[in-house]
Amino acid sequence: MNRKKATIVTYGCQMNVNETAKMKKLLEENGYDIIDDIHNSDAVFLNTCTVRGGAAGKIEGKLGNLKTIKNSRNGNLIIGVTGCVAQEEKEHLLKRAPYIDIVLGNQNISQLPEIMEKILDGEIEHAVLTNNEDELPPRIDANFGDGITASVAINYGCNNFCTYCIVPYVRGRERSVPLEDIVADVRQYIKKGYKDILLLGQNVNSYGQDFTESSEIKFSKLLDEICKIDGDYWIRYVSPHPKDLTTDVLEIMAKYPEKIASNMHLPVQSGSTEILKKMNRKYTKENYLKLVDNIKDILPNISLTTDIIVGFPGETEENFLDTLDVVRKVQYENAYMFKYSIREGTPAATMEGQIPEDVKQERLLRLMEVQNESAKNISLSYVGKTVKVLVEGPSRRNEEKMTGRISENKVVIFKGDHSLKGTFVKVKIVTAKTWTLYGELV
Ligand code: 5AD
Ligand code: SF4
């Protein structure tokens, strides 16, 4: 039988990358080859994100393209929307875009093959499945393509209700995957040769809090159990919430310096205690800085990265200066910096003191300037050092060069053979730019 073709377009966070890998595997098992070309596909899925305004806007444009393609083929194209926009809009999406065939929530991915069959058989016209958002989704296998990085979701949902954030409304309440399932998945990926294991959750360090009261399983215990698996790999995780980051996690990281990557993504969001309170983050500027000191005491070589929002409702120039102060003090290797964007239905959307666009833009540029300075200084501090690099493949710009990442999550470019892909090598850093290190194999 002729195999069909499908494209999955992924937006947003690592959780979507993970869910795309699961859909990929399911589709492959059901007669589809996965390609990257919406014009030559029999089915196209948009795995969407709604966390910020920009991402949601991109999806609108793509849906328009798909509509045109579908019309030009007399309707012969299955269009599916999955991810957070599906979860948020449910059947309303079909009203807005009736040419969509499938709307599938995050908990319902495993039902994809049966729905596609029903649509192709003409048994149903559309399918909208977005229920069970407070349950654990069934465990399904995934295909992560490159064979180097595999991700494992350890908990789903979020209970924190930061006032700007839509996630708790679309991804339901926090629920943790049983420890033995996670360890089994990680073991399986390591056995298959994956070298970079990424543990995922909206708030990884509240892992296990939803288990019974007598349960002693928590995030540090999970890390400890995973690190007992033999092999040449490293583990990363995103993201911990500063309010839940306890010393036992740092101690486990110190116990396994070869196995747990020396990087922590610790979203600060704002450096102003007043704004943090309005955001419902449950820490102050001082708490956060103290936490960073504690991290650096226990893990002196760790690289810290963060997320920052500028222009949250009510943010004054003085509040913003507190954010710049934190950025200067912490010295992040990298930061994802965003202008606040209104998410309908969240408390911040209707707060007084919404900040004009030009002020947000101006603050974003000032923030970037300060942050880029520390990124550059940290990059330069690698020059002369020899680092362990996980080789990802040939550099896109120059086939003779290979690109890879270090435990601190920085990109390294060096001259090397294509056969090094997927292995760990040692590279001596010779020069550095803000985002990238350049070196020679040793
Ligand atoms: N506006 C701007 N940025 C946001 N984020 C989440 N919600 C919003 C919003 N409404 C950012 C936060 C979060 C990251 C994933 O996206 O910084 O950590
Ligand atoms: Fe959103 Fe806050 Fe939950 Fe992160 S912790 S997903 S920012 S509500």
Image: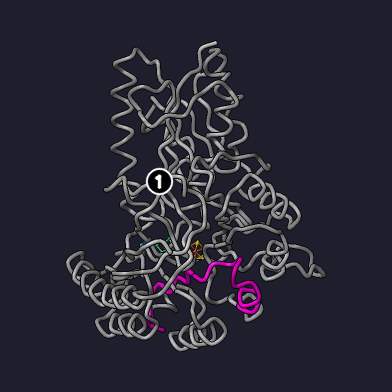
Amino acid marked by disc 1: Tyr
Point out the image quarter for the N terminus.
top right
Identified at 71% across, 59% down, the residue is 229
SS category of the residue bearing label 1: loop
Identified at 51% across, 49% down, the residue is 422
Front residue (pair 436, 71): 436
Taking the image as shown, residue 102 lies to the left or right of residue 69, namely right
Is 370 above or below relative to 197? below
Q: What is the crowding at mark 1: few (fewer than 14 residues within 10 Å), some, or many (at least 20)?
A: many
**Which percent across, then down, holds residue 293?**
49, 87
Identified at 69% across, 51% down, the residue is 187
**Which percent across, then down, holds residue 313?**
32, 71
- Pick out the residue farthest to the right: 214
Ligand 1 closer than 8 Å to the CB at disc 1?
A: no
**Which percent across, then down, holds residue 260?**
59, 67
Front residue (pair 99, 435): 435
Taking the image as shown, residue 318 lies to the left or right of residue 245, namely left
- Pick out the residue farthest to the front: 442
- In the rendered image, residue 260 lying in the magenta stretch gets the answer yes
Taking the image as shown, residue 260 lies to the left or right of residue 350, namely right
**Which percent across, then down, holds residue 118?**
58, 18
The segment highlighted magenta reads 250-274
Based on the displayed image, in which of its 4 quarters is residue 75 positioned?
A: top left
* Label 1 sits on residue: 11
